[in-house]
């Protein structure tokens, strides 16, 4: 792995303080340490790690890891919004130096296990060009990891390659946020004595920390691009619509990869899961007594509740973001807010892998023979949210193989395309259309069309499956396991696509246009207004030194299918 040797409620006046860098306006003493380069924030100082496991392309990179960005969410802070750390200068900035050369602990996952993962996981990681200094105002890429809101951690997604290859240079950031029940416990009792969507509020708090402190690392707090994949891509969308657009965005641009939405419940729909949690832990099921009991419960009891209450897919889905009301971070379903224009009109790149849907279709090719198989495996997961009438209209939009107008080679192909449209590909198209209507010029879409070779060898029928893009963006060149993701060294064509993709991403983060500082061999990435999207392809061979990526017209049939889902307001039906 790269970078190391060995994943709000505030008062108005405090919110304004959050936006202001806490120590940047004051000169601080230069501190040094034998551990590595030091960044002094005035209230804390951190020694980073400049060791580089690969050759630097554009200069060495320094990593600072495991830095707290909020108070530990323990005791009375459990199931509440993150509490801000003290940020005022201490002792004139002559503070002790913390070893920040490694990762902080991952957050508790699902399935959960005592001793694996930690409640005290609100930690942030920064990669900067080693020569970057305060005042350089480098663009910042802020990455939100995916994992269904119940697994993964920042260590799976090191930004070393993106910072190492950046030209012009950027600063990279990722962080941990509370997952599963610890971040997304919901119900009326939480609403009364706690905070809904604590995990999303963690993400917001991490972004606020970057605003206050990233200048010390050479970054520009006014030039932040948020990026995420799957649940991280869904998080990007949620921050675009956060608080119905009534509070500052805190970012200038957004990249959403394979935007992954499942059913998004209300507080009322979350009650059965909350009741099950209290039963397992042995707490009252209503009101402040329930929350007081849960806050004093042992980690062992909470682990049992995570595993017990999340033992079926129907309940597991409720440990995810919920609609939290008019004053919450997610007051309505995201597509409702987008349709109503209640979102931040920022520069945008959105897209998906060619076969995202195959990862979530609910079976193998042999499991899909008839319409009934699609109904039971694809539509049933949404329960009563999809009516029989809607299901029949949807099936007609996706003609069965061998029938007039069908482009599907099998029922599996048909079923996975339906899954793809509902859960992934229609949202990036919908957002791009609405941003264009708002007059945003820098809007771009893509289709990632090269598989993860390791996963392809295991399940070749999945093709360019979900997370394929991550293989090319994050540490694909290391041969070691990387916090749950396995990589192998790139061959020459995989390496070419990785460099090309990273250059597009960095160019967008720098200028709002993926073509400004693209690789010279890459095609121009035309904006969404042109009617096309970039298809990112691995070259078949590199003898010609040419890119295989191309622009393609967004297929009309895909536009029509997505118009059906979004006009229905599929979010009201399915939570997309």
Image (cartoon, rainbow, N blue to C red):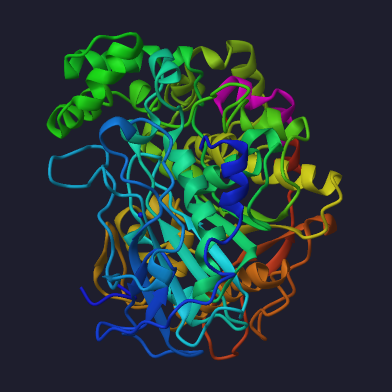
Is 330 situated above or below 510? Answer: above
Which of 352 and 417 lies nearest the eye of the viewer?
A: 352
The reply, left or right, for residue 473 in relation to residue 308 is right
**Can residue 425 be seen in the rendering of this structure?**
yes
Whether 83 is drawn above or below 80: the answer is below
Instruction: Name the spot of residue 542 as percent of width and height, x first.
Output: 53, 86
Q: What is the count of numbered marks?
A: 0
Is 1 situated left or right of 162 in this image? left
Is residue 363 toward the left or the right of residue 307 in the image? right
Task: Please state the horizontal and vertical placement of residue 468, each as a whole percent of the image.
Answer: 45, 59
- The location of residue 381, given as percent across then percent down, is 44, 23
Residue drawn at x 40%, y 40% as measured from the top left? 149
* Span highlighted in magenta in the image: 561-575
Which residue is depicted at the point 41% across and 54% down?
Answer: 69
Quarter occupied by residue 358: top left
Q: Nearer the viewer, residue 341 or 205?
A: 205
Q: Is residue 562 magenta?
A: yes
Task: Assign the magenta stretch its main secondary structure.
Answer: helix
Residue 354 vs residue 18, the one in the foreground: 18
Tell me the residue at 64%/17% (across/down).
390
């Amino acid at each position: 792995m790269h970078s190391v040797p060995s994943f709000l409620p505030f008062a108005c006046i405090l919110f304004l303080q959050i936006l202001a860098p806490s120590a940047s306006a004051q000169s601080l003493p230069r501190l040094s340490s034998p551990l590595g380069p030091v960044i002094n924030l005035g209230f804390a100082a951190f020694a980073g790690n400049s060791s580089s496991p690969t050759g630097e392309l554009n200069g060495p990179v320094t990593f600072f890891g495991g830095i707290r960005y909020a108070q530990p969410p323990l005791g009375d802070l459990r199931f509440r919004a993150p509490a801000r750390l003290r940020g005022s200068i201490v002792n004139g900035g002559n503070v002790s130096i913390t070893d920040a050369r490694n990762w902080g602990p991952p957050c508790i996952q699902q399935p959960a296990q005592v001793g694996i993962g930690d409640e005290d996981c609100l930690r942030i990681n920064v990669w900067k060009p080693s020569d970057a200094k305060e005042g350089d105002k480098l663009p910042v890429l802020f990455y939100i990891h995916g994992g269904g809101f119940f697994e993964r951690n920042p260590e799976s997604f090191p930004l070393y390659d993106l910072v190492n290859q950046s030209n012009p240079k950027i600063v990279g950031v990722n962080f941990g946020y509370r997952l599963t029940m610890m971040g997304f416990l919901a119900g009326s009792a939480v609403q009364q004595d706690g905070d809904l969507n604590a995990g999303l509020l963690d993400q917001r708090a991490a972004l606020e920390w970057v605003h206050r402190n990233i200048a010390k690392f050479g970054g520009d707090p006014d030039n932040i691009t948020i990026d995420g994949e799957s649940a991280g891509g869904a998080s990007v969308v949620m921050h675009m619509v956060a608080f119905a657009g009534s509070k500052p965005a805190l970012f200038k641009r957004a990249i959403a990869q394979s935007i992954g939405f499942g059913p998004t419940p209300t507080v009322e729909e979350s009650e059965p899961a909350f009741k099950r949690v209290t039963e397992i832990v042995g707490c009252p099921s209503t009101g402040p007594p329930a929350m007081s009991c849960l806050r004093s419960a042992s980690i062992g009891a909470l682990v049992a509740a995570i595993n017990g209450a999340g033992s079926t897919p129907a309940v597991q889905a409720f440990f995810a973001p919920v609609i939290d009301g008019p004053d919450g971070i997610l007051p309505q379903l995201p597509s409702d807010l987008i349709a109503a224009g209640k979102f931040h009109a920022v520069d945008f790149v959105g897209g998906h892998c060619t076969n995202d849907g195959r990862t979530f279709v609910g079976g193998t090719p042999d499991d899909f023979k008839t319409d009934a198989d699609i109904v039971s495996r694809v539509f049933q997961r949404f329960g009563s949210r999809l009516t029989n009438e809607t299901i029949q209209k949807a099936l007609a939009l996706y003609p069965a193989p061998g029938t007039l107008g069908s482009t599907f080679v099998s029922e599996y192909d048909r079923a996975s395309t339906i899954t793809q449209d509902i859960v992934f590909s229609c949202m990036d198209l919908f957002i791009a259309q609405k941003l264009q209507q708002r007059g945003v010029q820098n809007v771009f879409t893509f289709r990632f069309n090269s598989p993860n070779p390791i996963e392809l060898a295991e399940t070749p029928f999945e093709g360019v499956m979900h997370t394929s893009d991550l293989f090319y963006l994050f540490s694909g060149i290391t041969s070691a396991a990387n916090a749950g993701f396995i990589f192998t060294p790139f061959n020459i064509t995989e390496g070419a696509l990785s460099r090309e993709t990273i250059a597009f991403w960095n160019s967008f983060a720098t200028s709002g246009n993926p073509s400004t500082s693209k690789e010279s061999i890459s095609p121009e990435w035309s904006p969404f207004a042109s009617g096309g999207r970039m298809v990112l392809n691995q070259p078949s061979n590199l003898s010609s030194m040419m890119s295989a990526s191309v622009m393609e017209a967004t297929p009309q049939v895909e536009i029509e299918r997505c118009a059906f889902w979004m006009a229905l307001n599929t979010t009201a039906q399915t939570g997309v």
